[in-house]
Image: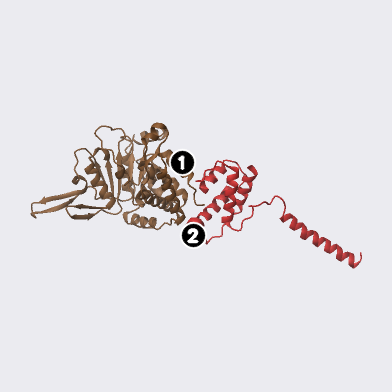
Amino acid sequence: MSPEDGILALLTAANLVLYGSAAYALRPRLRRGERAGDISGAFAALAVALQTAIPDIPPGFTWNEAVERTRKMELDVDWDKVSLALRSYEAQRYGGDGSVAPDYGEVLVLAKELRRRG
Amino acid sequence: MSSLVERIQRETGKVVVGREPETRLILECLLARGHILLEGVPGISKTLLAKAFAKCLGLEFKRVQFTPDMLPLDIVGGFVYNQAKKDFDFKRGPVFTNILLADEINRAPPKVQSALLESMQELQVTVEGHTETLPTPMIVLGTENPLEFQGVYPLPEGQLDRFMMKVVLSYQTSEVETAVLRRNLGSMEVSQVGRVADPEELVSLISETQAVKASDELLGYIAEVAGALRRDTRVDLGPSPRAMVQLVHCAQAVAMLDGRDYCTPDDVKGRAHLVLEHRLRMSRAAVLKDPGVTAGAVIREALDRVSVPR
């Protein structure tokens, strides 16, 4: 193999890795709402997913009521993590406590599961 | 805070079986500086619960049985001539206590009801220009016997509005009742109830409850709920501003006992029925048209309809 062939092979491999990663990142199952910049965005995404999956949910639902209702749907979700995220969100939303950076990933998982069901 | 609730429930549970939810509600009212109306048939442990509750918090307890021949001074007190001093002394009535069980309040004439309710509102008593302040903390547990229909003076709306909550004590399940009967085979004295807190601690808890945050959004939500109820054509008399203030205070107490320094919409919705239901007066026409239209149903619909700040 000549040095030029080696460079070509290296460049080809680098391109495969680069574009392959980009393709993976943009894979079709990553839809709108599964990414959220912050916890408020995550719960906003959940609100949209709830209204799709449970069209009869009244406007006056609270997050705790919604979580209790979705628990009964037997979704593949870590409910402890959802409860913790909810607690952090409420502390921020109603108590103004933004000191703790909450892990809201499971809220997005719940939103995704609800959209799948809806 | 949840451990305080559990300790109180455990101690009162030594003499009163199966009333843990009611015990918590009385504590919430006490911390929220409100009064509570208990409705239930005779022998359902209203007096025992109040006595046990007072004992475990180190509070003074007095009970007054309301009768049709009572006078206002039987509640608030009055001036009594002192022969030795050749002057009148103010003798304090039973309202000067921490926990007053006002039994069968609907049997007393309106004048007597007013005397009690005025002192509940003002937390002071004024007789012939002489004013005395009631102790702190102070809570009135009023009871109404739902069975008596003759010779009673039902509390008018203005008086009902002074009670933060109305709690209905119903019969227990057969399992709980069996436990009650079993416990009563031996002796069940209030003296068995241990102390878990003292009045000074309670005063401090009341201050902490007042400091619990209620965001402007949440207050706006509560005002929206009030508006929705007042606009409902099936309701003749909606909740007063006092009622909504008491709902906020109640939500603060719920949050405090749950170990939070902020209220959530769940705290508000969780107590809305207890705080608002006894204050609503339904339109007779609406009730005649549909007997299923109750204050509870109307409140439930309003809570479903009004969007919660999320």
Which disc is residue A96 wearing? 2
Residue B246 % position (x, y): 37, 50
Label 2: chain letter: A
- Amino acid type of the residue tagged 1 in the rendering: Glu
Point out the residue furthest to the right here.
A1
Which chain is red in the rendering? A
Q: Are marks 2 and 1 on the same chain?
A: no
Q: Can I make out residue B220 in this image?
A: yes
Disc 1: which residue:
B301
- Image depth: mark 2 or mark 1 in front: 1
- Amino acid type of the residue tagged 2 in the rendering: Gly
Residue A112 % position (x, y): 63, 48
Residue at the image position 35 percent from the left and 53 percent from the top: B197
Residue B73 % position (x, y): 18, 46
Which colour denotes chain B? Answer: brown
Quadrant of the rendered image containing residue A20: bottom right
Q: CA distance from mark 2 to mark 1?
A: 30 Å
Label 1: chain letter: B
Quadrant of the rendered image containing residue B135: bottom left
Quadrant of the rendered image containing residue A71: top right
Foreground residue, A32 or B169? Answer: A32
Q: Pointer 2: residues within 10 angstroms few (<14), some, or many (20+)?
A: few
Tell me if B263 is positioned left or right of B80 in this view: right
